[in-house]
Image (cartoon, rainbow, N blue to C red):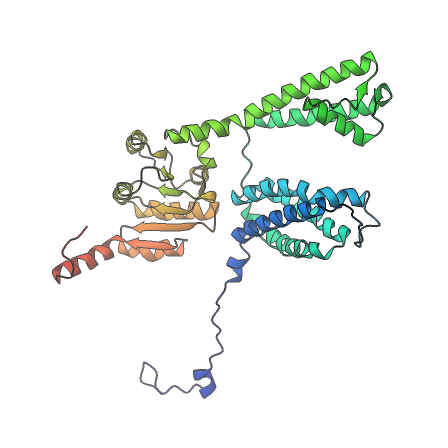
């Protein structure tokens, strides 16, 4: 046996036919990446909800787990914890999909709390939930750097949320302090219950003020609570509704684009991008970033979502929702700008798929080296089409 240079291959027989190099069929980096963390969180949420429903359906519960002796009110905890924790976990799953840091922080707090449920109940049907949590926590911790997008609340929205929390504390502490002037209010649990039903204006009547001071306090909780809740709903929910309505007319602002998911982001607007937009469905979710104000004005007139900023800047890339995008296309007529745009995208989201256009064949390798998953060599494609046309292999060049 000889090698390509003509010399004899002196490797041992075993090394030739049984090489030691192993073919990796599965990448651990991909298996334990941020996308896997989101999937696992979704699975934990579903299992938590199903486990909670199963527990609620039981007429009688007897906790027999190892944590039963140290848990206060173990029966109450295992009956309601599964369903109650599932809802915030679902919100965290959506937040992790958007790479929100606050979602990562809350998830790290909720997952160990949820693990207490099967360890307290001690039922064999809760083992899958415990195992799923045990797998999810290391993956979440491993990808802590990937979930670094701030929540992005405005000062008004932050103040609205803080107002609700402040009213809740005011109602709870105040009612507990005045508990001797209420019927049916004896402990902190009663105080929390009273505050929630009062702010929600439900008023079951089981907790009743008996003095003028207690009645005036209750009125203050009602006025402050309903006011804070109304303002918070307007600050948090109304922008999302308005953005969805505006999206139907193609008038989304840059901040509203953050609500998009699985969309296409085009960085730079050149001849290739223009040609591509002429072939796609007008209703496709596409966001274009270009610093050409004239082109941006024309695209906006045509109903396209445009951010008029430098596509090489990370702030513009993040504003376009790259962390939630399906694919990023880097398609300006300037290869140097394309390289910088690829770097900006990779700094914002290391995992998103990037397709780049190379106007010069010598820049293909550079774009791949800085993070492009696929590079379209325009000159190479043109040469192939020309060769087919000359050899009569193609009757039409599109």
Q: Quadrant of the N terminus?
A: bottom left
Residue 345 image point, x, y percent = 43, 46
| Image point (62%, 40%), residue name | 87
| Image point (47%, 47%), residue name | 347
Task: Tell me if residue 203 comes above or below residue 57 in the rendering.
Answer: above
Q: Is 32 left, or right, of 72 in this rendering?
A: left
Residue 142 image point, x, y percent = 59, 54
Residue extending furthest toward the right: 180
Q: Is residue 155 visible?
A: no
Q: Nearer the viewer, residue 330 or 78?
A: 78
Task: Tell me if residue 124 comes above or below residue 160 in the rendering.
Answer: below
Q: Quadrant of residue 391?
A: bottom left
Q: Nearer the viewer, residue 156 or 112?
A: 112
Residue extending furthest toward the front: 59
Q: Is 209 left, or right, of 387 in this rendering?
A: right
| Image point (45%, 38%), residue name | 260
Residue 11 image point, x, y percent = 43, 85
């Amino acid at each position: 046996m000889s090698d390509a240079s003509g010399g004899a291959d002196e490797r041992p027989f075993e090394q030739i036919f049984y090489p030691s190099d192993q073919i990796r069929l599965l990448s651990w980096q991909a298996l334990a990446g941020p996308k896997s963390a989101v999937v696992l969180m979704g699975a934990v949420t579903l299992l938590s909800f199903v486990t909670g429903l199963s527990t609620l359906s039981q007429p009688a519960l007897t906790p027999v787990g190892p944590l039963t002796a140290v848990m206060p009110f173990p029966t109450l905890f295992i009956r309601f914890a599964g369903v109650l924790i599932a809802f915030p976990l679902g919100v965290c799953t959506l937040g992790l999909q958007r790479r929100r840091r606050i979602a990562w922080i809350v998830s790290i707090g909720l997952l160990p709390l949820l693990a207490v449920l099967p360890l307290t109940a001690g039922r064999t049907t809760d083992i899958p939930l415990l195992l799923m949590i045990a797998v999810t926590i290391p993956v979440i911790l491993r990808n802590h750097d990937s979930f670094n997008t701030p929540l992005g609340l405005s000062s008004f929205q932050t103040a609205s949320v803080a107002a609700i929390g402040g009213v809740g504390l005011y109602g709870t502490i105040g009612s507990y302090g005045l508990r001797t002037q209420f019927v049916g209010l004896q402990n902190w649990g009663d105080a929390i219950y009273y505050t929630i039903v009062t702010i929600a204006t439900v008023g079951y009547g089981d907790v009743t003020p008996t003095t003028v001071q207690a009645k005036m306090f209750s009125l203050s909780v009602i006025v402050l609570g309903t006011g804070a809740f109304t303002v918070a709903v307007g600050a948090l929910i109304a922008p999302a509704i308005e953005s969805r309505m505006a999206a139907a007319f193609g008038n989304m602002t840059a901040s509203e684009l953050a609500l998009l998911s699985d969309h296409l982001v085009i960085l730079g607007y050149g001849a290739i991008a223009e040609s591509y937009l002429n072939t796609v469905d007008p209703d496709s979710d596409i966001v274009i970033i270009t610093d050409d104000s004239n082109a941006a004005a024309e695209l906006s007139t045509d109903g396209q979502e445009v951010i008029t900023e430098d596509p090489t800047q990370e702030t513009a890339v993040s504003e376009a929702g790259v962390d939630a995008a399906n694919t990023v296309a880097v398609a300006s007529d300037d290869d140097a700008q394309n390289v910088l745009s690829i770097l900006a995208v990779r700094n914002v989201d290391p995992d998103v798929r990037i397709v780049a256009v190379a106007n010069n064949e010598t820049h293909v390798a550079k774009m791949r080296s800085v993070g492009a998953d696929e590079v379209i060599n325009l000159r190479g494609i043109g040469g192939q089409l020309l060769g087919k046309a000359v050899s009569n292999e193609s009757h039409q060049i599109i």
